[in-house]
Amino acid sequence: MKQCYVNEQLQGQPRKPPNITFINKMAADDDVESSSEELCLFYKDREEWKDVTPVPQDDGPHAVVRIAYSERFQDVYNYFRAVLKSNEMSERAFELTTEAAELNPANYTVWHYRREILKALNKDLKQELEYISEVIQDHPKNYQVWHHRRVLVEWLNTESNELEFTALILKIDAKNYHAWSHRQWVIQTFNLWENELAYVDTLLQDDLRNNSAWNQRFFVVSNNTDCDDATVEREVTYTKEIILKAPNNESSWNYLKGIVSTKETIFNYPGLDEFCQTMYDKQLKSPYLLAFMVDMCEDKLEAGVDKETTLSKATELCTLLADTIDTIRKKYWDYIKKRLVSRFSEN
Amino acid sequence: MRVFKMAAPRCVIDLAALTRQKFVDDGVSSHSADEQENVEASVEQKFNIFHQWAEKEPEEFKWPPLNKEKHLRYLHKGLHHLPESYECLDASRPWICYWILHSLYLLGEKIPEEEASRVTQFIGKCQCPDGGFAGSPGQQAHLAPTYAAVLTLCTLGTEEAYKSINRETLQSFLGSMRTTSGAFTMHRGGEVDVRGAYCAVVAARLTNVYKPEMFEGTAEWIASCQSYEGGFAGQSGMEAHGGYTFCSIAALVLLGHERLCDTQALLRWLAQRQMRFEGGFQGRTNKLVDGCYSFWQAGAFPVVHSVLSKQDTSLDCTSWMFNEEALQEYILICCQNLNGGLVDKPGKPRDYYHTCYCLSGLSLSQHYLNEHHSCNYVMGGPENELQVIHPIFNIGLDSAKDAVAYFSRLPVPNIR
């Protein structure tokens, strides 16, 4: 039974557990950062921990970057250091890691130690998976909790509900890097490619600018297919449609270049030249369109096609970008122009 | 040395033109577009206010001042005491030391001997018997606090600091973090991503414990992290990201394998990360500007320059290939907290991490240098100028030179 309650409310009646003495403790001072009222039985006051000598933090006599730990934090960690030192592998040490992790979920030493106990006591990993799900939802951008989950899944050696869980997190933050990373690892490890493209589709319908979803698309297509002609064609058609909807969406242009490049230079890929030229002729000012056209010119120049006209077109586009359309990147486009001239002019 | 100055930031010179740089949603709204538009609105507010102030200013140069005194006060405070809210960084205390000391260095602050000694001793308490450094005394060794500890000690630059590093156990620790794929795990039983490789090779190079066999396969593994977008991800297959990109290209250069990178593709992606309205950098395509990318993204340009300079005659030898004035405009107008410290973006709270990386980005955008000459792009008065950094390590250029000189005189340990 949990013997330490933390009541975050400043008003209202605190919950009183039966038959347990408790210490009602207000925050130490008016410090805004610690406004929780703590109802806590410190480890140092617990009967069943009397055999353990707490180990205070040894910062040395002249510590710097000293953190104003709460009393609870110090108490928990004094005891954590103690069990770490004696390498105690027990249920009570396990519960202690729960509290330590709650106080600082970024403490990788605590998580690692918890994993040792999980193994030593042969604990229920499925239950642990449920626990870590809760923690991740509270701290979705923390490395340690995601890594903990990955280790559990590795140990269980089953895909469990990883796709569902990552989808849950991505519903709240569709670009969470850790979630995507975990999802990619799960898909690769357990061969769960089948429905991923459909999942990516739903995310892109939601937000066609979700670059993480575009990246996942590339991940699926490049790993799960041979990037055969039919697949690439389908992808190009798909992407062109999205580009037409929102020509200033950089993600779609990056993807187009990426997916075509697995097979072919963008210049050589059928229909792209025309696709771009049509938009250009309609006075479309998207800097990504123009950049794509510069890249196509470069491909053409490398293939030795129509050198003079192509170089002239390329430098014209670079100038347009540098001086009018994409001026924040003026130095970059001036460099690209200079580089093209230096590589391909007839001199 | 050549000096370049712009009279005023874009928001003063031509606010209307700058406003035309705002996000184009093509009539298709989405969450990403909403987020971007919200940030632009809050940045625009800052730009407007500054524009109004500048109109009344009689001076020729109209740039906001860097509030050095306020930042110094914030930094000095943190070096000694941190509030309870920093409990979440209890496993990152060498990082806090580095963020603060590096920021103090950038602001030209000298650290008194006694203070330097205190920091050295504390970092020493974080050193682990089996090598490497932990996030706090008594915790397990981890590559990130190891990196931060080494950088902190090199920033202090005292003999006591250098000597406090146990190079033999450090070498052994770094070696034990390498996996069979060439990638590095962050700590025993920890996660694997490209930060590990960067942290390990920096620590090894600065302290001269580097041996090629410690990094077998590492460069190839890093190269596999370059995505179709041109930037690098944390692991192969993942999305290109500013932090991981900096780690990747810097590590490749330190390993001597920069040729494994498609540099032109990287450069294109990097250039595209500067926000045309805000002036600062985003971490990933279609995400938001953040002051810390002033270093992770902008800091990759000097590294790319050094790679390209060996064979590319078209390279500009007078400045980095991003818009320095726009970046400085973003940092000075949008990222300074009124009470000292710097931030991610307007509306966000200050912290030592953002203070460090905003100032680092400011420093590198103020100074262009190569082997032959240097150019100065300090926007605003001389009081805005920061110390020069070494872009690969992100410590003072002098600190890096001194550390390398000191450790290169020591033999490379030979731990199996």
Image (cartoon, coloured by chain):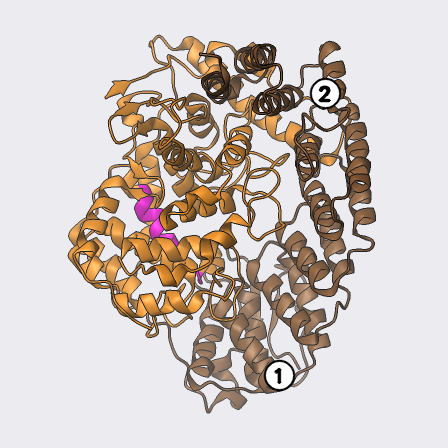
**Circle 1: residue type:** Ile
Please state the horizontal and vertical placement of residue A316, each as a whole percent of the image: 57, 10
> What residue range appears in magenta?
B90-103
Q: Looking at the image, is mark 2 or mark 1 nearer the viewer?
A: 2
Marks 2 and 1, how far apart at CA: 77 Å
Find disc 1 in the rendering and name its residue.
Answer: A20
The residue depicted at 62 percent of the width and 18 percent of the height is: A305
Q: Secondary structure at mark 2?
A: helix
Left or right of B103: which side holds A238?
A: right
Q: Position of residue B273 (x, y in %)?
A: 54, 32
Question: Which residue does the image show at 33% across and 42% down from the upper left?
Answer: B103
Q: Can residue A21 be seen at all in this image of the molecule?
A: no
Chain containing mark 1: A
Q: Nearer the viewer, residue B131 or A62?
A: B131
The rendered magenta stretch, by its main secondary structure, is classed as helix
Q: Are marks 2 and 1 in contact (CB under 8 Å)?
A: no
Q: Residue furthest bottom?
A: A51
Count all numbered tags in the image, as a single digit.
Answer: 2
Based on the displayed image, in which of its 4 quarters is residue A270 positioned? Answer: top right
> Which residue position is annotated with label 2?
A273
Which residue is rendered at x = 48% and y = 12% of the image? Answer: A346
Chain A shown in which color? brown
- Which one is nearer the viewer's eye here, A300 or A176? A300
Magenta stretch: includes residue B98: yes
Label 2 neighbourhood size at 10 Å, few (<14), some (14-19), many (20+)? some
- The quarter of the picture where the N terminus of chain B appears is top left
Instruction: Specify the colour of chain B.
Output: orange
